[in-house]
Image (tube, grey):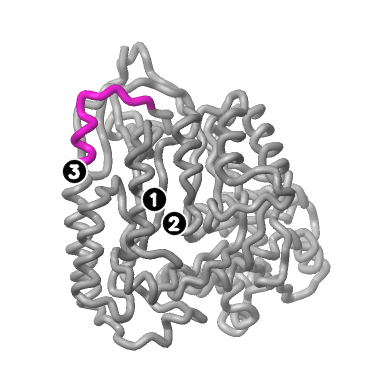
Amino acid sequence: MAGGSDKTFYLETFGCQMNVHDSEKVIGTLISQGYRQVATVEEAGLILYNTCSIRDKAEQKVFHRLADYKKLQAEGKKFAVLGCVAQQEGEKIFERAPHVSIVCGSASYRNLPEMLVQIEAGKSRVTGLDDRQTDECFETEFTARTNPHRGYITIIEGCDKFCAYCVVPFTRGKERSRTSESVLAEARRMAELGYTEIQLLGQNVNSYQDPLGKKSFAELLSAVGALPGIKRVRFTSSHPRDFGRDIVEAIESEASLCNHVHLPVQSGSTRVLYAMQRLYTRDEYLERVVWMKAAQREISITTDIIVGFPGETETDFEETLWLLDEVEYDGVFSFKYSPRPNTPALKYPDAIPDGEKSRRLAVLQEKQREIQRRRYQRHVGEVMEVMVEGKNEARGQWIGRTSDNKVLNFTASEARQPVPGSYRAITVTGSFPNSLVGEMVI
């Protein structure tokens, strides 16, 4: 990797949207340091894995991948493990995968250029593990955005909530927000480059605290939405404790703010929420749902749910099923509880057998499927605006996404084929539990 022509890299990303955007920034940083991205590991001099440790399987995938490519070390290739698994495992990664040269947690990405220089100079192992000590965010002008129409901006990094099941506070560090000025400056640059949709990101995006005290999260949302050229603004993921009525009021008043809120609940039982250390009760969560359902614009609500948390009784589970009926979510990401390193829940008694977790998950998913079947059916006959994302050539359908985050697959006449990134009015002609179908309005 000494010569400019040898400075090639391949990066694979595991996990959440935050990781995907982190990878965009890492790619931009590498390119700014004279590296060139290639499409395969065989072509690359440096192979990087941006990792996730939220789910056990995602973590296992990384080590399986490292084992698969160990043979490439003989060809002089270097390996780097980035992100949550890097922070969680630290220098143990060198023991488990001795061919790795760089271990860098997400809180240390700003140090990547210096770490790369050390590797290029011949150092065999370099680490960047800031954990919860840093106050700095990873801000860079070098972001290699992979979507030319929808762009992501991280406004807050880290987490201070310490839910009993979650490793994020340990792997991504403490909460630290960017200034509203820097966020708006980046959003303006994106608008000038032709981006029409911006998604604001954070582990708890609505826990945002402007270091300069100039804007609340709701005010920042409205300010981004008011920028010339911006047609849609999304945000994820929200924490119920910090979800204020002012966010709903912003969505009501600013048409560019998408009418969709992802508000993870995790359980419908207050007893389980307390054990999870979620910092709110079921009634407090439902109060926020009432705000959204009373809004002048219909707001689509989606959530995350964990089943089989230690000590979850059948009654607790029934309360979660009741919550599905009460809220009528448009989408639920549901998971079986899996123990994660360093989390308080590891010490909790009353572990639920995996077979029972699977049963509860299946029951929950079937109930939610029926709810979504009804919810999506309501749109048949409506005209909805989508941003065109691409085309499924095999089906002859275009793929679009509505403001309320529903996938709408549609057909268009040969004479009026849309282009990706454009906005089109679509008549909804049919529905499925997870998507809509329609025809472009002529």
Q: Measuring from the top left, give residue 349's x and y in whole percent.
A: 34, 88
Kindly identify which residue carries mark 2.
Answer: 240
Q: For the point 38% across and 58% down, which residue is it?
A: 284
Q: CA distance from mark 3 to mark 2?
A: 26 Å
Q: Looking at numbered disc 1 in the image, what kind of residue is underneath it?
A: Arg
Q: Looking at numbered disc 3 in the image, what kind of residue is underneath it?
A: Arg
Q: Is residue 335 left or right of residue 160?
A: left
Relative to 61, say whether 380 is above or below: above
Q: Which of the image's four quarters has the C terminus? A: top left
Relative to 301, say whether 207 is above or below: below
Q: Measuring from the top left, give residue 149's x and y in whole percent.
A: 53, 32
2 and 1 marks in contact (CB < 8 Å): yes
Q: Is residue 137 left or right of residue 405?
A: right
Kindly identify which residue carries mark 1.
Answer: 288
Q: Is residue 297 left or right of residue 249?
A: left
Q: For the point 44% across and 72% down, which residue is it?
A: 277
Kindly identify which residue carries mark 3.
Answer: 373
Q: Is residue 252 left or right of residue 154?
A: left
Q: Is 22 or 120 nearer to us in this picture?
A: 22
Q: Which of the image's four quarters has the N terminus? A: bottom right
- State which region is magenta: 374-385
Is residue 423 visible in this depiction of the protein? yes
3 and 2 marks in contact (CB < 8 Å): no
- Mark 3 lies on a secondary structure that is helix
Q: Earlier in the sequence, mark 1 or mark 3?
A: 1
